[in-house]
Image (cartoon, rainbow, N blue to C red):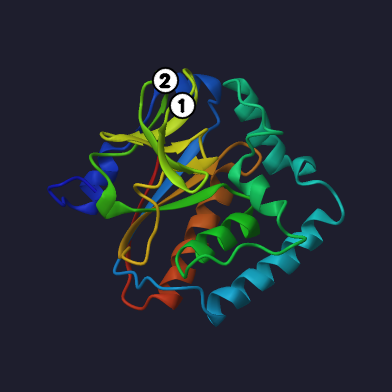
């Protein structure tokens, strides 16, 4: 979050989606959720059970089809193509998760496991980040190409840069997520120190705003059950 540790709703009020992104997909809606009072830690039986339930449900939804055949995923593949990305190589996050069903969804930690489960259950790209590592408000823009993006390559930290025109989430310090929802940076990722998080849920027409809101409600309810005392603020953008 910004260094002044301002109120969550004030911070959410500064978030924005650039007109250049709206021009690509006028049907786009973001749901931003701030969660405070989280209890970080490793994956546990509760999150493993949640993911197993979601895996079974998703296999039923796919019914042998490829993830790209689902309207919600096809929407995102078209959005990626609109700014020049190749979705067969740079996959929307929800498609990447669905493609891991055969071997099982990853078990990462008790915060990340929840938003991954919500992503697969509702067929919505969802990301979670450590709010205290943000510098300034979040915004979705088309990159100039010189913005820093902290990542890891061959086990070593690396600063990369987006392609000019790429759709990215960013703050004052650089890119926080490349290709809309493809890959998050290392600086703001959820860790075992995360107690305040920003969750970003991305919606297009096939999901619809009611579907996006249902996913957000599910995310908050699930987090509240696993993190007693957690508090939430949300904004549709």
Could you say which quadrant of the image residue 121 lies in? bottom right
Which residue in the rendered view is the most extreme toward the bottom? 45
- x, y percent for residue 223: 44, 69
* Residue 153, horizontal then vertical, whole percent: 50, 41
Report crowding for label 2: few under 14, some 14 to 19, many 20 or more residues within 10 A (C-alpha): few
Q: Is residue 120 above or below residue 168?
A: below
* Residue at 56% in and 47% down: 125
Q: Which residue is the site of mark 1?
A: 162
Q: Is residue 179 left or right of residue 104?
A: left
Q: Is 5 on the left-hand or right-hand side of 188?
A: left
**Residue 100 in which image quadrant:** bottom right
Q: Position of residue 199 (x, y in %)?
A: 42, 52
Tell me where residue 185 appears, x and y as whole percent.
Answer: 42, 43
Q: Of callouts 1 and 2, which one flags the residue occurring earlier in the amino acid sequence?
A: 2
Label 2 element class: loop
Q: Which mark is residue 145?
A: 2
Residue at the image point whose x is 55% and y is 40% from the top: 182
Q: Which image quadrant: the C terminus?
A: top left
Task: State left or right for residue 200 relative to residue 88.
Answer: left
> Which of 18 and 110 lies nearest the eye of the viewer?
110
Q: Are marks 1 and 2 in contact (CB under 8 Å)?
A: yes
């Amino acid at each position: 979050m910004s260094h002044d540790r301002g109120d969550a709703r004030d911070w959410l009020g500064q978030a924005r989606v650039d007109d250049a992104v709206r021009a690509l997909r006028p049907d786009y809606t973001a749901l931003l959720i701030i969660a405070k009072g989280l209890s970080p830690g490793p994956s546990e039986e509760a999150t493993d059970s949640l993911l197993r339930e979601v895996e079974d449900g998703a296999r039923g939804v796919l019914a042998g089809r490829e993830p790209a055949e689902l309207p919600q995923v096809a929407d995102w593949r078209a959005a990626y193509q609109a700014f020049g990305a190749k979705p067969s190589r740079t996959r929307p996050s929800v498609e990447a998760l669905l493609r891991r069903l055969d071997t099982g969804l990853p078990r990462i930690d008790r915060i990340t496991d929840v938003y991954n489960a919500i992503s697969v259950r509702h067929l919505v790209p969802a990301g979670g980040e450590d709010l205290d590592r943000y510098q300034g408000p979040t915004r979705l823009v088309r990159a100039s190409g010189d913005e820093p993006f902290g990542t890891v390559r061959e086990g070593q930290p690396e600063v990369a840069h987006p392609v000019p025109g790429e759709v990215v989430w960013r703050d004052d310090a650089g890119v926080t997520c490349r290709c809309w929802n493809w890959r998050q940076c290392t600086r703001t990722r959820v860790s075992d120190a995360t107690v305040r998080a920003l969750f970003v849920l991305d919606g297009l027409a096939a999901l619809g705003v009611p579907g996006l809101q249902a996913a957000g409600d599910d995310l908050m309810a699930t987090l509240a059950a696993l993190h007693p005392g957690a508090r939430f603020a949300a904004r549709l953008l």
